[in-house]
Amino acid sequence: MNIRLIVVSKTDVPYLQQGIEEYVARLKHYTAFTIDVVPAVKGQLPPDEVRRREGEQILKRLNGTERVVLLDEHGQQTTSVGFAEQLQRYMNAGTRELVFVIGGAFGFAPEVYAAAQAKMALSVMTFNHQMVRLIFVEQLYRAFTILRNEKYHNT
């Protein structure tokens, strides 16, 4: 299974980028994983317009055959073990490409919601969208170690 993470704008905080790179390198032992960066919308625009433009760019990166999961504050919450179990269900179902999407500061356009098959919340708390990237890749790595019964996750 190929896993892709689509994010809006670059990660410009060095310590976050370093952490992301560390977990992306670790993930290569388990799965094909890539991060696809959608350029940030420039200028002072209303939030709806920002969402619309970012949404267009996100949708251009989808081909309609992948399973799309939005990281969204209104999504389903789960534990790390529950997330690992969901990944296993995707693999058992023969999912070839799994795409997770982290939106920009204003969230997702309605068209992006319509293109997704699932929504997942990492927490009831709100995080900076750049921090979510690091948290997510760590949780993805953790999920694979759980599935392999490795020592990383302490139960």
Image (tube, rainbow, N blue to C red):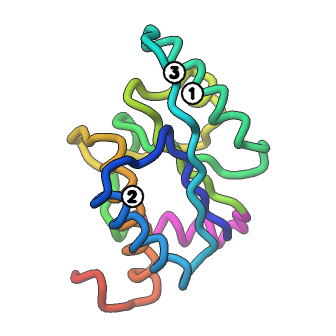
- Residue for point 43% across, 11% down: 44
- Whether residue 84 can be seen here: no
- Which picture quadrant has residue 117? top right
Say what secondary structure mark 2 lies in. helix
Report the front residue among 96 and 46.
Answer: 46
Q: How far apart are marks 1 and 2 (CA)?
A: 20 Å
Give the label on residue 54, or none. 1
Asked if residue 111 is positioned above or below residue 116 in the image, the reply reads above
- Which picture quadrant has residue 55? top right
63 lies left or right of 50: right
Q: Which amino acid does label 1 sit on?
A: Glu
Give the label on residue 136, or none. 2
Say what secondary structure mark 1 lies in. helix
Which residues lie in the magenta part? 82-96
- Residue for point 43% across, 14% down: 47
Report the front residue among 13 and 114.
Answer: 13
Residue 45 placed where, x, y %?
A: 46, 10
Mark 3 sits on what residue? 51
